Amino acid sequence: MALPSKVRIVEVGPRDGLQNEPGQLSLEDKKQLIEMLAGAGLSHIEVGSFVSPRWVPQMADTGELFAKLARKEGVLYSALTPNLKGLEGALAAKAGEVAVFGAASETFSQTNINCSIVESMERFAPVVDKARAAGLKVRGYVSCVLGCPYEGDIAPAQVARVAQDLWDMGCDEISLGDTIGVGTPLRTQALIEAVAAVVPVEKLAVHFHDTYGMAIANIHQALLLGVAVVDAAVAGLGGCPYAKGASGNVATEDLVYLLNGLGVEHGVDLGRLCEAGWFISERLGRQPTSKVSQALKGREKDCLLTHL
């Protein structure tokens, strides 16, 4: 299959990235990051989660953050909502889309959200129904699609069953997450082919972590199979608290560089995106994990030196 002519990037740094970073940023820093990302051309930004602050303290100010954002026309600002209480928060905040999150691993589901896969679907059904009744789109996340920290390899057929349940429930899009970053291109191909047999490929997204450095290769494989929605986090923010050693999401800067090289439209200004990554990395006291960001920063320093 030919590459898609256009890819929609779902920026998950402010939510999936920051909730797995140590420490807690100020509301103003989060607001500035999101507004910089929108200014760089990202059209879908996951702002935060309406979850218990006891479990995810980094997301405790999500409602306030939505209220203070200077929203840019044409940008979809979304939020994670694990239950009806979370959905109420998202509706009050006027989120443009909500998401529920399940897992393809039984053990991971029990560890992450304290219920079985079947029970998680029973929890999500009223959330999806109420969100759709309110006119909101709903995204369904599936974690551990290529491997689990407890169970090891996950069969594509198991992922397909969970994805189909979310699709049949009424989710508008299914995001397949390699939570611990163990995927390779051939395994990615088997995964996409299995899930696309039960959910239209144009309704699939991929969400790769870069633990073993395979995220960009896996994304390229998914693009070749017709996937045209990719999740990424600026500066490679994030990780997974349930998977020791798992690194952050694929960096949005690296994804944009790939798409530029492939001639695939995406609408993001790489320079302004890197500025957002450098900003948030400085606030976190760390370096971006993005290879592209590091290279461009180094080139910028070289240019300064030549003009001294």
Image (spheres, helix red, strand yellow):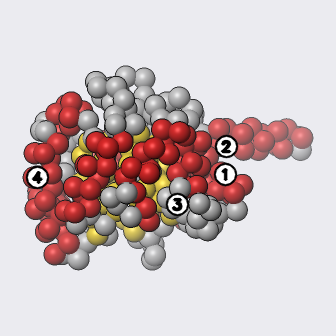
The residue tagged 3 is 226
Which mark, by number, is residue 44? none
Mark in the foreground, 3 or 4 = 3
Q: What's the residue type where badge 4 is placed? A: Arg
Earlier in the chain: of badge 3 and badge 4, it is 4
Instruction: Check disc 2: other Cα within 10 Å, few if <14, some if 14-19, many if 20+.
Output: many
Q: Residue at x 53, y 56 (%)?
A: 225
Where in the figure is residue 280, as x and y percent of width and height?
Answer: 50, 44
The residue tagged 4 is 123
Pick whichever, 231 or 46, lies toward us.
231
Earlier in the chain: of badge 4 and badge 1, it is 4
Which mark, by number, is residue 292? 2
Mark in the foreground, 4 or 2 = 4
Pick whichever, 148 or 45, lies toward us.
148
Q: Residue at x 15, y 55 (%)?
A: 124
Earlier in the chain: of badge 2 and badge 1, it is 1
Q: Are marks 3 and 2 in contact (CB under 8 Å)?
A: no
Up the image or down, 157 lies above or below 227; here it is above
Whether residue 204 sits left or right of residue 80 in the image: it is right
Tag count: 4
The residue tagged 1 is 257
Report whether residue 209 is seen.
yes
Where in the figure is residue 230, as x and y percent of width and height?
Answer: 48, 55
Q: Residue at x 18, y 75 (%)?
A: 134
Q: Are marks 2 and 1 in contact (CB under 8 Å)?
A: yes
Whether residue 3 sits left or right of residue 113 in the image: it is right
Determine the CA span between mark 3 and mark 4: 31 Å
Mark in the foreground, 1 or 3 = 3
**Occupied quadrant, residue 154:** top left
Q: Secondary structure at mark 2?
A: helix
Up the image or down, 18 lies above or below 108; here it is below
